[in-house]
Amino acid sequence: RTSLNQTKRCNVNTESTKTYYRIAIYIPFLDSFISNLKERFLKHKQILTGFQSLFPKDPTILSEETLTEFQSLVSFYKDDLTGTIDELVAELRLSYRLPNEDRPRDALSALQHVTDTFTNIITCYIS
């Protein structure tokens, strides 16, 4: 199937319809689908890593990398949060000092510990 006058048509020289379908429709569809997935999920990777700072694997160490990830999370949700970045970092440091049995492991368990002390951190959990 080749066309001479149409410029927006796929001109693939193949012998089988299966190969034509694969080249003309299936491969561009897969390429578009993968591009959309990358744009949708990998673009926000830095923001998503900020959530890992809220649930640390080793809560005794608050590294500079964790603070940077948390600050990127705060800057993304700055319209929803009250307080300055310094206040939010102080809340994060306080949440790292909670005893192991009181420390939330995920967002649902964090909602059980809602207090006025950690209002901004809880807003990050819910968002």
Image (cartoon, rainbow, N blue to C red):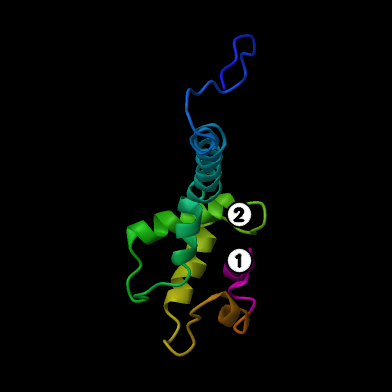
Quadrant in which the C terminus is drawn: bottom right
Q: Which residue is mark 1?
A: 120
The answer to whether residue 5 is left or right of residue 69 is right
From the viewer's side, name the closer residue of 18 and 118.
18
Which mark, by number, is residue 99?
none
Q: Tell me residue 76's x, y (percent).
A: 57, 50
Q: Is residue 52 above or below residue 71?
A: below
Quarter of the image for residue 21 reads top right
What amino acid is found at the position of numbered circle 1 in the picture? Asn
Query: Is 11 within the magenta?
Result: no
Q: Which residue is mark 2?
A: 77
Dominant secondary structure, magenta = helix
Choose top left, top right, bottom left or bottom right for residue 8.
top right
Relative to 105, is 83 on the left or the right? Answer: right
Crowding at label 1, few (<14), some or many (≥20) Cα neighbours within 10 Å?
some
Few, some or many residues within 10 Å of mark 2 (<14, 14–19, 20+): some
Classify mark 2: helix, strand or loop: loop
Tell me the CA gap for discs 1 and 2: 10 Å
Three-letter residue code for mark 2:
Tyr
Question: Which residue is at a point 50% across and 24% down the rendered structure image?
Answer: 12
Q: Which residues are magenta?
A: 115-127
Q: Quadrant of the N terminus?
A: top right
Q: In the image, what residue occupies the spot 57% across and 36% down?
A: 25
